């Protein structure tokens, strides 16, 4: 397309979910309930870890950062979707769209790295329990989290800088409920070969490395536990690791389907459903899978409830 036929889009239109108008109220209530569950669940985890000194361990340190990342990841996409469902105002400014895309890429990447770090932490705890304190020292934990933030910030900034150099034509309709990178690339009038190359190379590396760490850690955990002739130990480990791997498979499977294996030029309903799973469902499941089933978290919650009731009793008296 010749440069004179190009136009700079000042806003985009988010088509949202593929639902009928009469279904909007029901889906609004559903996603509002899911978002509040995500928000309250992750805030509760972060609060318990902050207040209970028994939870000041590497595993819960990583969990607190995962909780924060999940809150941000869900808020970036779900709040705009809820606003569109309620007000039926589908427009989003160019700056707002780019900002949403940048933050989504940042916290999506951070989730990947934190899941890998947590898997490595469990590997050291189960396979090398005597060396756990020496290996997972405070300096290493801070370095792992800081490194995750650094690489994800660079990753998001790279894709944002590559995106803002592109031109967008009169077609400004995004067939999704948020400003997704792949959808924006499909709307561009410019040559996006460099963007697509970076998505498949740099993005692929940052996708495969955490996934390989997660799978490798759980494979080693499984092989270690199988050598221990204890039915109770086997059941406990596979119950925990199985639920972790389920969430990981759900997250990475849908993410790969949208960014690496989506063949059509237009976003399909399947892509939107996959986007809902990794942006809405997974952040809601993480608190339940990784912590609320944990005995230490349950004890900390009981102590918090007891203290709250005791303070309430003193105020009444």
Image (cartoon, rainbow, N blue to C red):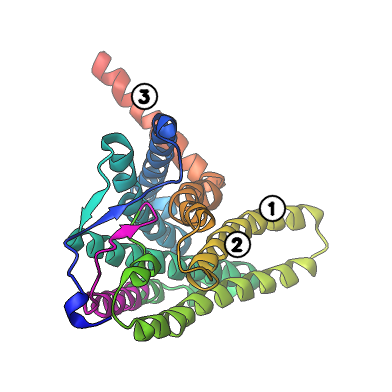
Looking at the rendering, the stretch of residues picked out in magenta corresponds to 148-177
Residue 212 visible in the displayed image: yes
Residue drawn 38% across the image and 48% down it: 16
Q: Measuring from the top left, give residue 82's x and y in whole percent.
A: 33, 41
Q: Which residue is mark 2?
A: 249
Q: Is residue 170 left or right of residue 39?
A: left
Q: Which residue is mark 1?
A: 239
Task: Assign a secondary structure to mark 3.
Answer: helix
- Residue 23 sits above or below residue 271 on the image: above
Relative to the observer, which residue lies in front, 308 or 121? 121
Name which of mark 3 and mark 2 comes first in the sequence: 2
Residue drawn 32% across the image and 72% down it: 149
Residue drawn 28% across the image and 41% down it: 83
Q: Is residue 172 left or right of residue 302?
A: left
Quadrant for the N terminus, please.
bottom left
Quadrant for the C terminus, please.
top left
Task: Assign a secondary structure to mark 1.
Answer: helix
10 Å crowding of disc 1: few (<14), some (14-19), many (20+): few
Q: Measuring from the top left, give residue 165's x and y in whole percent.
A: 22, 79
10 Å crowding of disc 2: few (<14), some (14-19), many (20+): few
């Amino acid at each position: 397309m010749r440069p004179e036929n190009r136009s700079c889009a000042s806003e985009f239109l988010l088509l949202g979910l593929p639902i009928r108008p009469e279904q909007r109220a029901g889906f609004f209530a559903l996603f509002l309930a899911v978002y509040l569950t995500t928000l309250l669940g992750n805030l509760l985890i972060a609060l318990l870890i902050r207040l209970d000194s028994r939870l000041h361990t590497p595993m819960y340190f990583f969990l607190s950062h995962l909780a924060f990342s999940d809150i941000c990841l869900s808020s970036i996409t779900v709040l705009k979707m809820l606003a569109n469902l309620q007000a039926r105002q589908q427009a989003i400014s160019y700056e707002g769209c780019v900002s949403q895309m940048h933050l989504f890429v940042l916290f999506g990447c951070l989730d990947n790295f934190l899941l890998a770090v947590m898997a490595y932490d469990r590997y050291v705890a189960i396979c090398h329990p005597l060396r756990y304190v020496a290996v997972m020292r405070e300096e290493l934990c801070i370095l792992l989290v800081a490194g995750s933030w650094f690489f994800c910030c660079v990753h998001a900034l790279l894709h944002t800088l590559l995106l803002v150099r592109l031109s967008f034509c009169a077609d400004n309709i995004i067939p999704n409920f948020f400003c997704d990178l792949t959808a924006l690339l499909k709307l561009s009038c410019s040559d996006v070969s460099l963007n697509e190359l970076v998505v498949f190379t740099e993005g692929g590396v940052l996708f495969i490395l955490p996934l390989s760490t997660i799978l490798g850690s759980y494979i080693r955990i499984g092989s270690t536990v199988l050598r221990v002739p204890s039915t109770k130990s086997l059941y406990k480990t596979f119950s925990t690791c199985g639920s972790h791997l389920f969430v990981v498979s759900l997250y990475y499977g849908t993410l790969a389907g949208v960014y690496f294996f989506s063949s059509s030029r237009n976003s399909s309903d399947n892509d939107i459903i996959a986007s809902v799973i990794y942006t809405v469902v997974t952040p809601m499941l993480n608190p339940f899978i990784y912590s609320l089933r944990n005995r230490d978290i349950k004890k900390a919650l009981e102590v918090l409830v007891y203290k709250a009731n005791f303070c309430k009793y003193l105020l009444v008296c």
